Image (cartoon, coloured by chain):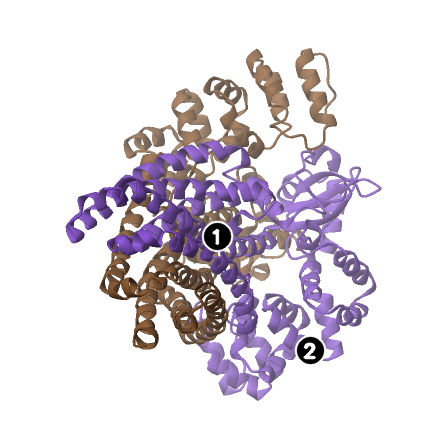
Chain colours: A brown, B purple
């Protein structure tokens, strides 16, 4: 805790007292005071107060500040802290701020940013804009930036940072420690030292913990771990996330085809990937469009993306309409039949969605593999029969009580059982088939399954009716 | 790489050659050879070969081994490596193995396990079983175990490990390094040294990286970071995950109400929490039961859990049946009306699911807050109108072309527009209302929304028909 001297104005003094005595004080709560402070444009005071907060906290309230306030605040901070905040901003906030910064400030921030976050920023900018920004970087950072830009965004190469520390096998630990002391300041998260040969091929790893607890006179060779989990440059980010979930490592090295050390992926990149991939799965499964930042997205574009699915579903839905049309002689003869159409379609659609939900998620987490298809079918058949009997009984009861028609009850019950068994089985099988065809299983969405089942359910219902009811 | 001497049999020799020359050789591929090796019961050879694999890799093929094979393999390994594998097993595999181990082996494994994983194991055992196992622990581990068992499983206390290293403010860095050397071996992941006062209150943090790069003669006080992100013991695990996602820290300290240092939560625990919480959300949203390990779960229990939702949905579905019944005079007069019921119900159900998918996920990731309800409504109303016009036009076209009835086309189109606007709006609002009522928003599932919309859509359809079509 710093002592507060008279160099601060009364306002700042009050603000500092507030922060110091309110442990874990929320940035949002004292936002009015922060805005007042920004209005004074006192750089030193602004720097002092914001230092009490985490970059992530400041980024969180960023949208509550006007662009002018953002600029005063941002320009008052030293470049390291400013770059930290910048990395936590939303993409649209980054772009807006970047456009308003002076060239000098842009240069400072871009050079301070970690290489992987900088590449993410470049990825959302038009390429002519990137070509203007890259020359602002220091020479070695330029080379790195161009290298990283060459990798696809959703591969290991696009995720990794090039900030890592290497050593060679014949070094002594004390030598490695000396190197570390020089380079560590510029790197956010150091978990391992990577041991490479003279052509940068990865030979081993020494965790920081081991480095600290080993006799400094030992040779790297005798201490390093040669059982290395590594990731190839072109591995898909979804598979990268799986590796992290499986091995529980906080940082994994990335190598090229010749096993040369290229970069490091850390747990925090993976948290972002998992969030992104999960959202994508969920949006697909809800037949909704993949939309970043729902609240700020352009509604025209969202509607456009969603309506494509809706049209596909509507066209598929015409098939069930045609089935209905084809069997309309049944409906005009027995009007009561139509009362059970919504419940049959709805219940089988729900049963199918339930099964598909389990299987789509199971495939996503890696629990269900292609080879498990028979286990899934057996399970869902069984579950379908159990649930069908119960749902059938309830529906039959309604037919007997409200319509007083036992034969109608039997018909509806049998249709319900068959429809639900088909529903759970198809709900289980279709996502696995999609996976086998190389299509995202989540695209076999709840609404799509419900639409498919509408048709099968109507066919089952009318045919059971003809068999049992119509002939009498 | 070790040189291979004649102490190994020919089989083991071949196996080792296989592993050494096949870089990143998959455990699954050489499983037949591993099984042969296990059958020889040569402990030394088993230990030698398995050492080439990661514990997570061995755990992954665990279910391919018979219980006998599992026991021979497990008992051949040194206790540290065995415990590492054990921690990666599925819960049911852990229980099966544990039951077959000798008391000595049980003691070894339980003492070697990290405190948080051990607590997770105890949490799935009956309490009388836990009471038998705890006395097997070393004295200080017993105290820790009992303390951790007292916390609820899904809170910070239930997630944290008690393996951490503390130092006091007046120590010199060199002193801290000495301490670290003694204690580091027993701790899997060390990110920070936690600085506490004489009553264990957390005062500051020194990251390992800083420890390594600081002058060893400096005092802790002058080096430590006093801006600490910490988590309270009783914080819900979902909120814990948010903290990690927000601040990008690999390890966060857990404190009690008096700010005393109690434990540490690491990124890998959070990966598990995120996976678990996301699965729960997805299962809820699919109106499916929350079921761990789908493939091994008892189908009776799965059916029982799922059928509850199905019954609720079926009963709600009766309402739409009654609506149909109430307006059946329309259907018997204009039979063509019924052909459009499936498409209307299906399209509005899908549109509602789309909107709900976005909002439920947005609430889960923290993007959408309770206060955003008006922004969501405005957005979904707008999207609903756009999509309704398109879907309405397509449906009208069908009516005009196939039924040759322009008035029917207009009726269906208007019903479709109104139904879809209601669908997107309700799909957007209902999850937020659930959240406001303190209910998991994901429980406003796709099937539930579709069921609700079935009724509203039929009501809209029939009333538009009466207004436009029936009177002519």
Q: Is residue A319 left or right of residue A384?
A: left
Give the chain of mark 2: B
Q: Residue at x 30, y 37 (%)?
A: B386
> In front: mark 2 or mark 1?
1
Any part of residue A407 in sight: yes
The picture places residue A336, in percent across and down from the top left corner, at 36, 62
Q: Count numbered badges in the picture.
A: 2
Residue on which the image places disc 2: B99
Q: Is residue B310 left or right of residue B225?
A: left
Q: Which tag, 2 or 1, sits closer to the chain's start? A: 2
Residue on which the image places disc 1: B445
Q: Nearer the viewer, residue B333 or A131?
A: B333
Q: Secondary structure at mark 1?
A: loop
Q: Nearer the viewer, residue A94 or B290?
A: B290
The picture places residue B464, in percent across and down from the top left corner, at 32, 42
Q: Residues within 10 Å of mark 1 (few under 14, many from 20)?
A: many
Q: Secondary structure at mark 2?
A: helix
Any part of residue A313 in sight: no
Q: Residues within 10 Å of mark 2 (few under 14, many from 20)?
A: few
Q: Nearer the viewer, residue A231 or A122?
A: A122
The picture places residue B192, in percent across and down from the top left corner, at 66, 45
Kindly report the distance in space between the C-alpha atoms of the residues bearing marks 2 and 1: 40 Å
Q: Nearer the viewer, residue B5 or B363?
A: B363
Give the chain of mark 1: B
- CB within 8 Å, label 2 to label 1: no
Q: Is residue A160 left or right of residue B188?
A: left
**Quadrant location, the C terminus of chain B:** top left
Q: Residue at x 62, y 30 (%)?
A: A53
């Amino acid at each position: 805790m710093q002592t507060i001297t008279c160099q601060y104005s009364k306002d700042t003094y009050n603000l500092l007292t507030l922060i110091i005595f309110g442990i874990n004080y929320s940035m949002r709560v004292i936002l009015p005071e922060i805005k007042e402070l920004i209005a004074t444009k006192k750089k030193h005071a602004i720097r002092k107060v914001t230092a009490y907060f985490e970059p992530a906290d400041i980024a969180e309230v960023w949208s509550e500040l006007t662009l002018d306030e953002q600029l005063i605040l941002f320009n008052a901070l030293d470049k390291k802290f400013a770059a930290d905040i910048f990395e936590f901003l939303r993409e649209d906030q980054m772009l807006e701020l970047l456009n308003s910064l002076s060239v000098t400030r842009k240069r400072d921030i871009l050079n301070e940013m970690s290489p992987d976050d900088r590449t993410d920023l470049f990825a959302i900018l038009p390429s002519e804009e990137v070509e203007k920004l890259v020359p602002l970087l220091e020479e070695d950072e330029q080379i790195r930036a161009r290298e990283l830009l060459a990798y696809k965004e959703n591969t290991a190469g696009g995720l990794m940072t090039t900030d890592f520390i290497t050593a060679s096998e014949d070094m002594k630990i004390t030598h490695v420690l000396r190197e570390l002391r020089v380079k560590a300041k510029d790197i956010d998260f150091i978990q391992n030292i990577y041991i490479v040969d003279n052509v940068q091929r990865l030979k081993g790893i020494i965790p920081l913990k081991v480095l600290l607890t080993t006799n400094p006179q030992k040779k790297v060779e005798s201490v390093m771990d040669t059982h290395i989990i590594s990731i190839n440059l072109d591995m898909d980010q979804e598979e990268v996330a799986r590796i992290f979930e499986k091995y529980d490592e906080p940082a994994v090295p990335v190598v090229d085809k010749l096993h040369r050390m290229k970069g490091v992926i850390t747990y925090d990149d993976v948290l972002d990937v998992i969030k992104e991939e999960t959202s994508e799965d969920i949006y697909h499964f809800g037949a909704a469009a993949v939309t970043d930042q729902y609240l700020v997205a352009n509604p025209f574009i969202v509607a456009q993306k969603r309506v494509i699915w809706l049209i596909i579903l509507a066209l598929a839905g015409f098939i069930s309409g045609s089935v209905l049309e084809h069997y309309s002689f049944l409906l005009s003869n027995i009007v009561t039949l139509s009362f059970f159409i919504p419940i049959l379609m709805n219940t089988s659609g729900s049963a199918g969605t339930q099964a598909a939900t389990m299987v789509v998620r199971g495939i996503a987490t890696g629990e269900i593999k292609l080879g498990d298809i028979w286990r899934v079918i057996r399970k869902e058949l069984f579950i379908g029969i159990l649930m069908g009997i119960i749902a059938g009984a309830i529906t039959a009861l309604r037919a007997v009580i409200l319509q007083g028609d036992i034969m109608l009850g039997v018909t509806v019950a049998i249709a319900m059982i068959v429809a639900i068994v088909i529903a759970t089985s198809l709900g289980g099988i279709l996502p696995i088939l999609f996976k086998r065809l190389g299509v995202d299983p989540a695209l076999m969405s709840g609404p799509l399954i419900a639409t498919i089942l509408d048709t099968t359910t109507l066919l089952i219902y009318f045919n059971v009716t003809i068999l049992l009811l119509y002939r009498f």
